Structure formats: structure tokens, C-alpha cells
């Protein structure tokens, strides 16, 4: 399913993504057939270099290895926790790649690490990967005592911001915990976290963040049926714990604008940002009305716009891209672009149905210019590419089926979501997680032949 090139450029601008697809364009102009002008060709089962199992379907020429399975031993002998989610890759020493990975675990005993709440089972692990030897060097816990660490995002100063997708706490009628949750925590890629919530960034059902490297402003998404898009302007660039201002996106001339329905690709709106006066006002459960959305309600009261389940976020070429997982008339997802220099919001893509794109979630920007989008739908999940020509294609399909138990894991997991797509600093490896049973994949191949 594709937009025409002309319509896409009208909707996104000629420089929508970070880098032109020079290699692909040169091949086409020279009359040399590419594998596919759309993507990389048909998907087929490819055997994992680690297990020999065909866990992924990929285009011809691509290969991968798996690591970081749930239950694999870490450096201290403990086992890797389950529910792998958001992730980022950083440059390590000696050409190594450092991966900081979320684990979307709920209440329970905390792992032994810098711990926020002893009754919370989530957190982050940090893995050092050697791309030349194609093996894991080390894995350790880097944050513990948090809940439902879903997504987050990397910072230009070399840390991972991990986000809690929950608002449970002492006042929660269903799952009371000693401490309030719904915060963002910072984990340096080369050290452990201090396990201190950055409360000025808001207490709500967080999903992902993306940082504007030019300004240091952090953009935040909210994963709820009625969600806001926020930005945090830190008092001190790169020192988020020093405090700052939390604001919510609003559409000029339309208080409480609902972006979730009745949109068309190319729709463009002038925007402004409204202040959240009390960012640490948590949601509270109410027996008659459900969630009382503290931060969101403040933004809506000030005229803020709403989206339907904002999840993924990434920043590149001076623009922010976010996914509304079940936005759109078909409720199958939208990709939005924010141009902060011009204060404009633009709908880049809206899925007309599940066969095209089934509920986009995590996303990242390829070093070569395309968006990589992880699917969160109930059909067989895929990793999609969205090219700067405006064409969407499937790059990988989940084929995780484990007949012989591995770390006690067995069964058909091919309908479980992908998460945490991120590229190595040199752009040669794409790392992505199968959230369940909890596996990390490192994929490499002829990237220049297509849109990623």
C-alpha cells in the first residue's frame, strides 16, 4: 500500500527524513535492478545463527543472531528477566555496542540493583555486544524497582530515559504500592541508574521520549485511549533532574482538538504549547468515573489536543515522529510529524486497515533515511519500513515457534509484538526485541538496497 511520491512530498516535505537513499537511487538511475523499489523483496524464513531455528522471516540477503533470551544468565549469575520492550544502542569502548533494554514487568519483588521501589519488578538491563565477534560480552541489571518499563528513548548525552507505563501507587485501590509510579528514570549507558524519578517530567502513563539534540527539549508520549503529546523544557540542558517546564501540544484555534478521527494524510495544523502547572499530580482511580487523568486533564483544560494511544517517538532531521497506535478511521494507527521550528503538526501516514499496518508502536529513524516501525497488532506482527517516497513495506515477520524448551520456554509466540527497534551507531545492525518470550535479535544485511 503506498501513497504517490507527489502526495507524500506534499504531506511531509521533500526532506522529511534524515538522509537521502543515495545508494538505491543511484542503482535505479543507472538502470540496475534493485531487489525491490518498495523494500527489499519478499520475506522468507531465515535460520537464527544462535539456535538454528527460523525465528524471523526476512528478505533475501539478511541474516541475524539472537541473544538476551529470558532466563539466560547475566554477569552475576542471575537470569535475564522477561518482557523485553523499548531499547537503545550506544557506542561503547573498543567498537562495542551498548544496549539498554526495558523490561515491562508489573508489581513483584525487585531485582537487586539500584532500586526505586522494593515491590516493583520492572527495570532495565544493559548488554554489551561485540559486532565484530557477533557475540554478547556482558549483561547486567542497571535499574530496578520500577513498573511496566515500556518504552523510552536515548539522549544525546549518552543515557536511556526509561518510562513507566502505569500510575499505580499508594492511593491505587487495586494494586497499592509503597511509592507512587508513573515517572521517567535515567540510566546512563555506561553506569547504573540512580533510581530517582524525574518528577518534573510528569506523572502519567508514559510510553516513549525523543530528544531534540539542538535544543535539549524532551518530547514525551502518553499511552492511553485519550492521550497528550508533551514536551519538557529542562532548566539546565542535559540535566533533567534540575527541573523544568512540562507542556502539552495544542492546535491553534481549536481547544481540545481530537486528532484521532476524520484525518487525511497531509493534514497540517499550526500548534502551540500549553503549560502543565502541576506535573506531579498523578492519576487517581475513581469508583464512578474510572481514571481521573491528572496531567492530561490539566492540559485539556488549557486547550490541549488529544491523540489515541500515543506510543513510539523518534527525532531526526529537525522533526519529531510519533505513532498513534489505534488512531485513524480504521483504528489501525497513524504516524504524525511535529516540526518544532515551524510549530506545525502533520499527518504523515494513516493505515487504512490491518493488512497494511496493524497498530504501529515503537519506531526509530534509519541512518539511511526511513522509519522503522514495530507492529503491536494481534495478527502476525511485522517490522515495517516507511520510505521517504512514502511507501510502506514489511521488513521482518515474527516466526518465533519453540518446540524444544529453551530456558523453560516453549510454544508458538509468532503473534506477539516486536519492540525496541534501534540501530547500532554505525548503522550496520538493527536490534529489535520479541517482547514475548523475551528475545533480542541483531539483524544485518544489504541495507543500501532498499528504504532502510
Image (spheres, rainbow, N blue to C red):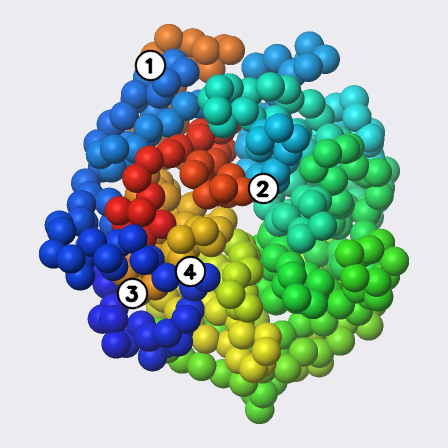
Q: Foreground residue, 213 or 375?
A: 213
Residue underneath mark 4: 19
Q: CA distance from mark 1 to mark 3?
A: 36 Å
Residue underneath mark 2: 88
Q: Which mark is residue 389?
A: 3
Which SS class for mark 2? strand
Q: CA distance from mark 1 to mark 2?
A: 26 Å
Q: CA distance from mark 2 to mark 3?
A: 26 Å
Residue in the picture at 81% in, 52% down: 198
Name which of mark 2 and mark 3 comes first in the sequence: 2
Name which of mark 3 and mark 4 comes first in the sequence: 4
Tag in front: 1 or 3: 3
Residue underneath mark 1: 52
Name which of mark 4 and mark 2 comes first in the sequence: 4
- In this view, the residue farthest toward the bottom is 253
Compared across the picture, whether 407 is left or right of 104 comes to left
Amino acid at each position: 500500500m503506498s501513497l504517490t511520491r507527489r502526495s507524500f512530498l506534499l504531506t511531509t516535505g521533500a526532506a522529511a527524513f534524515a538522509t537521502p537513499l543515495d545508494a538505491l537511487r543511484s542503482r535505479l538511475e543507472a538502470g540496475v535492478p534493485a531487489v525491490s523499489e518498495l523494500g527489499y523483496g519478499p520475506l522468507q524464513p531465515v535460520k537464527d545463527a544462535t539456535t538454528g531455528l527460523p525465528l524471523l522471516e526476512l528478505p533475501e540477503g539478511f541474516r541475524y543472531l539472537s541473544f538476551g533470551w529470558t532466563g539466560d544468565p547475566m554477569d552475576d549469575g542471575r537470569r535475564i528477566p522477561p518482557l523485553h520492550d523499548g531499547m537503545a544502542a550506544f557506542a561503547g569502548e573498543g567498537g562495542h555496542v551498548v544496549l539498554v533494554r526495558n523490561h515491562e514487568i508489573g508489581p513483584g519483588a525487585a531485582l537487586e540493583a539500584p532500586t526505586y521501589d522494593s515491590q516493583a519488578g520492572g527495570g532495565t538491563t544493559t548488554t554489551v555486544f561485540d559486532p565484530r565477534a557477533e557475540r554478547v560480552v556482558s549483561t547486567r541489571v542497571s535499574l530496578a524497582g520500577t513498573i511496566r518499563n515500556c518504552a523510552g528513548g536515548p539522549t544525546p548525552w549518552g543515557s536511556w530515559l526509561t518510562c513507566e507505563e502505569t500510575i499505580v501507587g499508594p492511593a491505587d485501590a487495586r494494586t497499592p504500592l509503597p511509592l507512587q509510579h508513573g515517572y521517567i528514570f535515567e540510566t546512563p549507558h555506561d553506569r547504573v541508574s540512580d533510581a530517582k524519578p524525574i518528577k518534573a517530567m510528569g506523572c502519567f502513563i508514559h510510553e516513549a521520549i525523543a530528544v531534540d539534540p539542538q535544543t535539549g527539549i524532551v518530547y514525551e508520549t502518553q499511552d492511553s485511549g485519550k492521550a497528550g503529546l508533551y514536551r519538557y523544557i529542562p532548566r539546565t540542558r542535559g540535566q533533567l533532574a534540575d527541573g523544568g517546564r512540562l507542556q502539552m501540544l495544542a492546535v491553534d484555534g481549536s481547544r481540545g482538538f481530537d486528532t484521532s478521527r476524520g484525518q487525511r494524510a497531509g493534514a497540517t495544523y499550526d500548534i502551540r504549547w500549553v503549560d502543565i502547572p502541576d506535573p506531579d499530580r498523578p492519576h487517581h482511580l475513581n469508583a464512578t468515573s474510572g481514571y481521573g487523568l491528572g496531567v492530561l486533564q490539566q492540559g485539556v483544560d488549557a486547550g490541549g489536543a488529544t491523540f489515541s494511544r500515543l506510543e513510539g517517538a523518534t527525532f531526526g532531521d529537525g522533526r519529531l515522529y510519533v505513532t498513534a497506535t489505534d488512531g485513524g478511521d480504521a483504528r489501525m494507527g497513524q504516524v504524525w510529524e511535529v516540526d518544532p521550528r515551524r510549530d506545525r503538526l502533520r499527518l504523515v501516514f494513516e493505515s487504512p486497515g490491518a493488512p497494511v499496518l496493524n497498530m504501529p508502536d515503537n519506531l526509530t529513524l534509519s541512518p539511511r533515511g526511513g522509519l522503522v516501525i514495530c507492529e503491536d497488532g494481534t495478527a502476525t506482527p511485522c517490522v515495517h519500513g516507511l520510505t521517504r517516497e512514502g511507501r510502506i513495506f514489511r521488513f521482518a515477520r515474527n516466526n518465533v515457534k519453540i518446540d524444544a524448551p529453551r530456558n523453560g520456554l516453549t510454544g508458538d509466540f509468532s503473534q506477539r509484538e516486536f519492540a525496541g527497534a534501534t540501530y547500532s551507531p554505525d548503522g550496520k545492525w538493527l536490534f529489535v526485541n520479541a517482547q514475548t518470550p523475551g528475545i533480542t535479535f541483531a539483524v544485518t544485511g544489504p541495507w543500501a538496497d532498499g528504504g532502510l
